[in-house]
Image (spheres, helix red, strand yellow):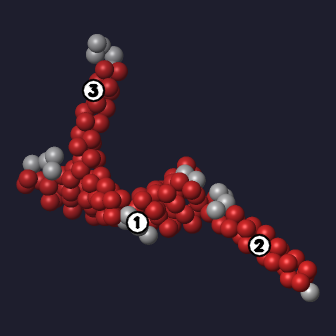
Amino acid sequence: MKLHAIGLSLVLAVGCTGMAAAQTEDSPEARIQAVERYFKEVSIRELMSDMTREVSKQLPPESREAFENTLLRNLRMDVVETAAKQSLARHLTVAEMDTFTEFMQRPEGKSAMAKMKFYMADLMPVIQQELVRAINLSQPGSR
């Protein structure tokens, strides 16, 4: 009887180990689940709204509200969120997504992410300016 109990314990221990490994498996389905966990912590809608408000500060004050309203009214958040989820699931492993999710659950992570709108607002005009410059330089006779 004691031998059967030991055998049963070993079978259960091995079975539980297999279940834990299956949960951390890096399969397409597991990645999708990890991305969904991440999006419970991060709102694309808030991120886009915040970024739009910050980018609008590059415009004259009298144009900002119309810019924000037009952009946010016409931006298909569901399309952006679906694309973001698909891209994350394609490029990041389950472990990487879990790390991002854990980061976003921390107060420092939330604070850092809230500041990303300022970073993007600062960077966007520089990127736009450099793109225009690069395009102009590539035109025949521009050198």
Q: Nearer the viewer, residue 141 or 32?
A: 32
Q: Which residue was labeled with disc 3? A: 133
Q: Quadrant of residue 4?
A: bottom right
Q: Earlier in the sequence, mark 1 or mark 2?
A: 2
Q: Residue furthest front?
A: 2
Structural crowding at the residue carrying mark 1, measured as other residues with C-alpha within 10 Å and reported as few (<14), some (14–19) or many (≥20): some
- Dot 3 lies on which element? helix
Q: In the drawing, what numbered circle is on residue 16?
A: none
Q: Which residue was labeled with disc 2? A: 13
Query: Can you say which quadrant of the picture contains the N terminus?
Result: bottom right
Q: Amino acid at mark 2?
A: Ala
Q: Position of residue 43 (x, y in %)?
A: 37, 65
Structural crowding at the residue carrying mark 3, measured as other residues with C-alpha within 10 Å and reported as few (<14), some (14–19) or many (≥20): few
- Dot 2 lies on which element? helix
Q: Position of residue 95 (x, y in %)?
A: 57, 56
Q: Residue at x 32, y 26 (%)?
A: 134
Q: Earlier in the sequence, mark 3 or mark 1?
A: 1
Q: Which residue was labeled with disc 1? A: 105
Of badges 1 and 2, nearer the viewer stands: 2
Q: Amino acid at mark 1?
A: Gln
Q: Nearer the viewer, residue 31 or 15?
A: 15
Structural crowding at the residue carrying mark 2, measured as other residues with C-alpha within 10 Å and reported as few (<14), some (14–19) or many (≥20): few
Q: Residue at x 46, y 57 (%)?
A: 100
Query: Can you say which quadrant of the picture contains the C terminus?
Result: top left
Q: Position of residue 3 (x, y in %)?
A: 91, 80
Asked if residue 89 is positioned above or below residue 128 in the image, the reply reads: below
